[in-house]
Amino acid sequence: MRLFLAIACFLIASPANALDAASANIKTIEANGWQLQGVHIALTELAKSPQRLVLTIDRLVLPEPFNDLNLANIHCAAFTWGNKAMVCAKGQAEIRSQRWQSPAADFSFQVAENRSAFSLANLYWAGGRFAVEGEEIGHQWRLKIRARRVDAELMQALIKLPSAEFKDGRISFSIDASGSNDVVHTIDAAVNLKDFSGQSTDARFAAEKLNLTARLEAFRDDNGWQWQQHAEASGGALYAEPLYLTIGAQIIALDAQGEWSDKTQQAEVKSISYHHPGAAALKGSAVVRYDDKVRIEKADMTLTSEDLAGLSAAYLKSLFEGTVLEGVSLAGRLRADFSIAQNALTHLTAGFSDLDVDDESGRLAMQGGDGIFNWSSDEAFHKKSEWVWQRLQIRALPVGPARFSFLAKAGTIELLEKTNLPFLDGIIAVNAFKWQTRPQGEPEVYFEGNVDKVSLEQLSNELDWTPLSGTISGHIPGVDYRDKTLSLGGELNIKAFDGEIKVTNLASSGLFTDFPRFHAELEINNLDLDQLTRRFEFGGITGRLSGYVQQLYMENWKPVSFYAWLGTPDDDDSKHRISQKAVRNIASIGGGGAADILSRSFLRFFETFMYDKIGVGCYLHEGVCQMMGVEAAQQGYYLIKGGGLPRIDVIGYNPRVNWNVLMDRLARISTTDEVRIE
């Protein structure tokens, strides 16, 4: 007011020299934390009424919490100063902060005894438009920020976020906040992302062409902050390690409300609702701590899906990539209730209906699955689970309708009662099964059961083997899988071709890797050669066959070494006859000269021959088979020792045969009716 009085006295004291203008310069003006530096006030057009008061300011420093912004080169064309108030109604100003600068924008302010305010509008910032309003009444303040269609890449360059990188898209946002002194009392924030692309610097989170709107409202009370939020995603893609989500035409919505406390560094999510049409819905509540890292203290959630095919395509496909479940998809319906404590799952109840499982690799398929899966981390948990399916396919092997009843708790899954699995016109009985996880290493598995009258013909057909006849029956003793090794606790007895095959010392390591290893020994007793050869294009043989395979070792399901023998048992008193075709094929294995004898003598007129013994042995080492026969000959070894009339001997002359060559010979024998011996 003294300034205005001085100007008025100056004008009255100079009547002889009429003035068009009067001005004054003030170095600094301070009020309520505001600071005006380099103030120039000019009163112009004095001869007119009313006169015009113009204000220019070199720099305006704002009070907290707005003190990061500094306004420079302020020009107020409509300025008043009186009644303990300073008002700039129409002004222009340049913005300067610690992070960015801008050209001139519309500016106004008011500094009064009880109220101070400023407004900044039509600011072109980062390719978009920006506006800020601030007001202070006593110790209370409010702040409004509006930004429209800001270029994300330019924004990144201006503010240089340390933990994120914006690459493309437009960002619009608004912030309404209020408080007192340096304490924030309310926040109302909204953001809209259009075709936004960016990622966190640690590459754990990313967005591509994302369309998103979100709003957060919060206010402080005596207990901390009360808040609620709503978000909708309507296009683009999101990545949150390890999940990659493509957002289609359906709008994905997330709603939540709760409270958080700065003192306890804990947020209570009283309710959360996530809805993805055509895929899944998630509802529940949680308590989250956010001190040194984010941790779920506890949570109770419910997941529902009326279309598991949609859930599988949207979420499971990306989660399964690079794992043993890659290529697996689901269909059907699901409801799951689960609880989490200290970032760990503690309880799960999952109900499935009309479940279908498909695997692109053909490893597993299921149709008509229904059941309830109950699990708890509590060792005292005893609520059973049940599972039923109409059809199960493991590789090429079909399993008929079955039902399982089991108990799942902590790291254990255990069968509660014996289960019969219909399999190829027979039954596989699962008498005992237990799965036990280990903190370090792979789980341990135990299995014991029986096989009853499983069709060899159907089994060979499903596995694309040469057709076999008969059935398999036998007992499967305790099978253990631990320390990455599968082992047999006793003998596996298989009844086939009116004889018996015993498997002992069975063990496998790396079974579920790309390089499995396998050990076993086999004992073969009194197989009916007539039944056996009738299923191959080998030629007919009658009699019995016994033998063994000792010290069998395989890598990636290919034999590396073994010692094997197959031949006529010493006590075999059955009828021994062999067809001409079988003679030729046996001769081709050992490189014998039977073909010449058959073609150059009267023996070619006989379809079958008598024999005393048949036998072939192999010691496989370093890819070469050391061949053996029923006994030594003057040159070579007998593969067939003749007996009776007509009789024929087949002698092998090659003591060492390459294993791959031998397999090629056997493959040709089993796939063609004609064998040429040279």
Image (cartoon, grey):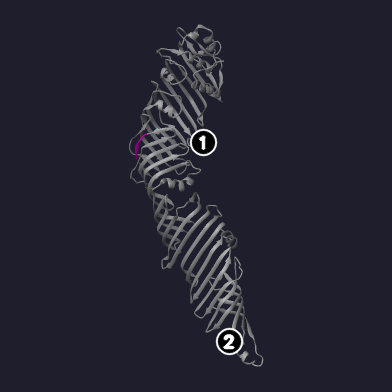
Label 1 and label 2: CA atoms lie apart by 96 Å
What residue lies at 46% left-to-right and 26% top-to-bottom? Answer: 465
Above or below, comparing residue 311 to residue 495 in the picture: below
Q: Say which residue label 2 marks.
A: 49
Report the residue that reaches farthest toward the right. Answer: 17
Mark 2 residue element: loop
- Crowding around mark 1 (Cα neighbors within 10 Å: few <14, some 14 to 19, many 20+) is few
Report the amino acid beneath label 2: Ser
Image-quadrant location for residue 462: top left
Magenta range is 400-405
Q: Which label belongs to residue 625?
A: none
Which of discs 1 and 2 lies nearer the camera? The answer is 2
The answer to whether residue 358 is left or right of residue 404 is right
What percent of the width, then of the height, locates residue 443? 44, 40
In contact (CB < 8 Å): disc 1 and disc 2 = no
* Residue 348 seen in render: no
Residue 108 in sight here? yes
Magenta segment main secondary structure:
strand
In terms of image quadrants, where is residue 491?
A: top left
Residue drawn at point x = 48 percent, y = 16 percent: 615
459 vs 540: above or below: below
**Is 656 covered by the magenta stretch?**
no
Q: Residue 587: give x, y in percent of width and height.
A: 52, 15
Q: Which residue is mark 1?
A: 514
Measuring from the top left, give residue 673's x and y in whole percent: 49, 19
108, above or below 650, in the image? below
For marks 1 and 2, the one nearer the N-term is 2
Q: Nearer the viewer, residue 53 or 670?
A: 53
